[in-house]
């Protein structure tokens, strides 16, 4: 996908459902939760004005970055623009079907996540598909003109 298309997606989107947000493990230091990739990305996108719905069926009701964790896409009453996925590639066809049912506009698979079947499901339903790209890094690169090798939000951790 071309930079202009990604820019348009990010400009025209207000809501993100983030599937695979990390929850606190028993006995884990709470500071570790803030450093988990999905949670860092969630906080970053919130800081730039996006409404982010965290999804993790094993952490329903927990509060992460000020938002109550949802069980699934279906459990969100709001319209969803971007379905952002932090789950293994083999789980994405099911997530793509949920995105179609929810009438999401974009299926965005984070770094290292790609799936031909999920892409076909999304495209057949006129949902834009991106894979193997970090939404946070794309935002930084396209709007803040920075492309750090390993971006760290020092002031956010």
Image: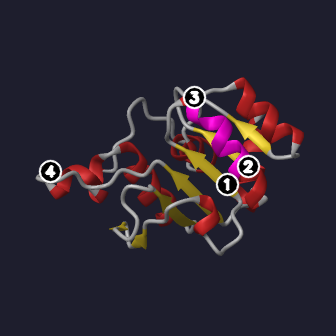
Against 34, residue 48 (above or below) is below
Q: CA distance from mark 2 to mark 1?
A: 5 Å
Asked if the magenta segment contains residue 104, the reply would be: no
The colour scheme is secondary structure
In screen coordinates, is 92 left or right of 71? right
Q: Earlier in the sequence, mark 2 or mark 1?
A: 1
Asked if the magenta segment contains residue 95, the reply would be: yes
Q: Secondary structure at mark 3?
A: helix
* Residue placed under numbered mark 3 in the picture: 90
Other-residue count near label 2 (Cα within 10 Å), few / some / many at <14 / 14–19 / ≥20: many
Against 119, residue 58 (above or below) is below
Tell me the magenta residue range.
90-98
* Residue placed under numbered mark 1 in the picture: 82
Q: Which mark is residue 127?
A: none
* Residue placed under numbered mark 2 in the picture: 106
* Residue placed under numbered mark 4 in the picture: 28
Can residue 157 be seen by looking at this rendering? Answer: yes
Q: Secondary structure at mark 4?
A: loop
Looking at the rendered structure, the number of numbered marks drawn on it comes to 4
Q: Between tags 1 and 4, which lies in front?
A: 4
Q: Quadrant of the C terminus?
A: bottom left
> For the point 42% across and 52% down, which residue is it?
21
Q: Are marks 2 and 1 in contact (CB under 8 Å)?
A: yes
Q: Secondary structure at mark 2?
A: strand
């Amino acid at each position: 996908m071309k930079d202009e298309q990604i820019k348009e997606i990010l400009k025209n989107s207000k809501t993100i459902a983030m599937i695979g947000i990390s929850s606190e493990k028993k006995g884990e230091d709470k500071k570790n939760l803030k450093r988990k990739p999905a949670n860092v990305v969630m906080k970053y996108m919130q800081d730039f004005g996006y409404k982010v719905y965290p999804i993790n069926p094993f952490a329903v009701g927990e509060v992460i970055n000020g938002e109550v964790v949802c069980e699934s896409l279906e459990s969100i009453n709001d319209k969803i623009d971007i379905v952002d996925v932090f789950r293994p590639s083999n789980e994405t066809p099911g997530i793509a079907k949920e995105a179609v049912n929810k009438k999401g506009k974009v299926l965005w698979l984070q770094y290292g996540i790609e799936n031909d079947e999920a892409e076909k499901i999304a495209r057949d339903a006129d949902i834009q598909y991106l894979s193997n790209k970090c939404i946070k890094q794309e935002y930084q690169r396209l709007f803040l003109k920075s492309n750090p090798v390993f971006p760290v939000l020092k002031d956010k951790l």
